[in-house]
Amino acid sequence: MERVERHDILNALGLALVLLAMALGLVFGARALFRTVNGGLVDSSKTEEVAAVGDGTDTSDGAAETGDAADPGSTSTTAEPTTSTTVAELHLPSEVLVRVGNGARRGGVAGAGTSIVEQAGFPTLAPKNAPSTEASIVYYVEGYQADALALARLLNIAEAQIAPMPADPGIPQDEALLVVILGADTTVG
């Protein structure tokens, strides 16, 4: 009987070590995921401005000069329009409400995508069926482009498939800040 008790103790210790190793793996995996979603994409302490101007030059303060080099005070009447895009800072996942839609033509995709999004710390609305689509896309409301990029990376969606929220994203937006439509190309589900 003494032998059985030692064997049981050794088994219990072995199981405890395995469970401890698994818990540590989960903690470090969650930290790595949080860093990827929260800090590894955009420096959240700064915003980045990109200014595209016809023949003008971009100055260090982000303003564009379109005037004649000989007369800095003059402006050209044929100057190209200025397009300025600001990439807002990344929000905490818990502050970004997400809705996932299934446009993949196979069952369970939106539910599986919603689970992945929730596990990353995003609150979600109920998943919905979306019109069939080949390519997955992430739509964002103004100020949430960096969050859309983080979500796209989480769901293996190409950066080129991120776009501003249209009037009709294909599923009810309700109060969601990001809407994901998982298409036939998705690896989710």
Image (tube, rainbow, N blue to C red):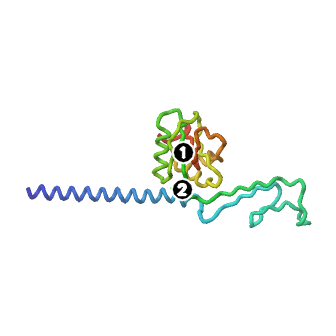
Residue lying farthest left? 1
Name the residue carrying label 1: 99
| x then y, percent, for residue 89 | 61, 60
* Of 38 and 95, the residue lying toward us: 95
* Of 17 and 132, the residue lying toward us: 132
**89 displayed left or right of 49:** left
| Quarter of the image where one finds residue 44 | bottom right
Above or below, 36 relative to 104: below
* Of 56 and 99, the residue lying toward us: 99
Q: Which mark is residue 178?
A: none
Element at label 1: strand
| x then y, percent, for residue 14 | 24, 57
Q: Which mark is residue 95?
A: 2
Element at label 2: helix
| Quarter of the image where one finds residue 55 | bottom right
| Quarter of the image where one finds residue 43 | bottom right
* Of 55 and 63, the residue lying toward us: 63
| x then y, percent, for residue 116 | 47, 47
Q: Callout 2, which amino acid?
A: Glu
Q: Residue at x 67, y 61 (%)?
A: 48
Above or below, 97 relative to 130: below
Q: Residue at x 14, y 59 (%)?
A: 6
**149 displayed left or right of 85:** left
| x then y, percent, for residue 151 | 55, 50
Q: Callout 1, which amino acid?
A: Arg
Quarter of the image with the N terminus is: bottom left
The reply to whether the C-beta atoms of the residues labelled 1 and 2 are less than 8 Å apart is no
